[in-house]
Image (tube, rainbow, N blue to C red):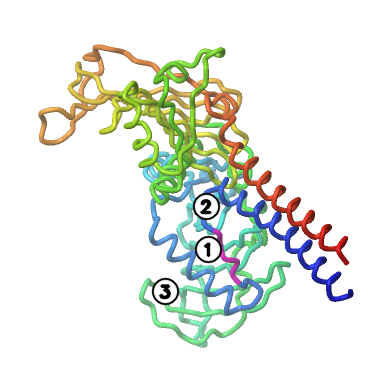
Amino acid sequence: MKTMRNSLETVQKSSVILVLLSFGFLTNAQTQEPAQTTKPLTDVAGIEAYCKELDSFKKRKPNQARWFGDVAPWDRSGMTLNAPSAKWQEFKSRKARQSAATGDNLYDVADIWMKDEKVVLADLWFGSPSGDWSQFVTYYFRDDGTIAKMRSTFAGFNLHPFANPEESGARLVQTRIYDASGKRLSKRLQCFELGEKGRQKKCSGDYSRYEGPAYLKVQRLPMYRLLNSQRLNDVASIQAYVRSLDTFKKRNPNRARIFGNLISPNQATYPVPHDASRFWEEFPTRKARESTAVKRPDSPSYDGADVWIKNGKVAIVQFEPNRYFYGGERVVAYYFREDGSLAKMRFKFHDPGVDGDVVKEMIYDVKGSVLQTGMQCVQTNDVRRPRRVNCSRILQDDDAPVYRRVEELPFVDLLNEQAVKLWNAAGEMLLRTSHHGSRAADSL
């Protein structure tokens, strides 16, 4: 009796676990992202391995940082130099930041790398108009925003860290490793002769005062307000965000969810009347979508949409209205913020007047107002290399529907349908298992 009861309890527990596993699978299916392995970041060896990975990440993606600088000007009219109150600003590129330099500003700059919308690495340069010292600090952060490691290089003409006090000029390299609570696990000081290839020599004392500011959390970075609140509501930050999404899409071309409107092309998509009939379906692959469309002779073309999910949220939707099997002449890409609002829309269509493609771009703030528009025309037909041409040659000025919210997408009801199906299937399995267990108990 006891053994049978234990068996029934095991069956019921297994059923509950099955439901939870199904829900977990549902989450993974919605996010369409590979599971990430959590690395041990509580000991020095684990932290060093993690930071090496971040160094490799930065080396592979040198131009995918976000670029910041302190644009507040120094006053050099008096006998002494006084640092102004910081005024950090984000730039669309390194070149744009360099162009903003006046000779009295941008002595403090920062390059920030992000993964999955979280700051993981920050390079900060500090200096002053005097030019007699400079400092470069790299900060490595965990996923939770706590610092894992910082490495500081301070170079100055007036440093005397060596045994010979008459020997001036040095470069101090200091490394600090921290646990998640901010407790320092290790520290190291190295002293070098001044110059990029200066020899390492024994330090004559403790020079912790030159280690640089220790930002133990991402929130303490001096440009954090720009990283957080201002982000995705101004043109520069939105463009940086869109570039990161384009990279995400390029790395995961086959991880999109595939939709198609095969029965009635254009009726429900181009543009979308609020009372239009919906004929959208979801398919497991692009090939399955096209194979199904081929079997419908009344549909020589179809409306297609590929949707990339990031962190459980719709990030990119790429429409191809009236698409033929070899490709469409219209491609509309929508980039959404995590709150579901439209950040940017890119519309590309073929135009015979320019013998090539027209690309229109519109950037939106969080309230849906247009921040910036742009248009570019590229001749691609009968030329060896694509070249930009005057857009006045456009013969058919086309427009695409604007979905300012994810909820406005014509197949939004299907985005959550997969979740409902998985949950219902898991629930039915639990019900059947419980029913079977009840009958077994009654027979005892």
Q: Determine the residue positioned at 56% across, 49% down.
A: 29
Is label 2 or label 1 in front? 2
Q: Disc 1 to disc 3, how far (Cα)?
A: 17 Å
| Nearer to me, 69 or 224 | 224
Magenta: main secondary structure:
loop
Label 3: which residue? 194
Is label 3 or label 2 in front? 2
Q: Disc 3 to disc 2, how far (Cα)?
A: 47 Å
Q: Quadrant of residue 369?
A: top right
Label 2: which residue? 33
Q: Is residue 132 magenta?
A: no
- Answer left or right for 26 relative to 55: right
Instruction: Give, as a three-letter code, the residue at label 1.
Output: Val
Instruction: Give, as a three-letter code, the residue at label 3.
Output: Leu
The location of residue 87, given as percent across then percent down, is: 58, 41
The residue range painted magenta reads 35-39
Count neighbours of disc 1 (C-alpha within 10 A) and say few if under 14, some if 14 to 19, many if 20 or more.
Answer: many
Image quarter (top left, top right, bottom left or bottom right) of the C terminus: bottom right
Is mark 3 in CB contact (under 8 Å) with mark 2? Answer: no
Image quarter (top left, top right, bottom left or bottom right) of the N terminus: bottom right
| Nearer to me, 188 or 113 | 113
| Nearer to me, 409 or 241 | 409
Label 1: which residue? 137
Is label 1 or label 3 in front? 1
- Answer left or right for 60 relative to 182: left
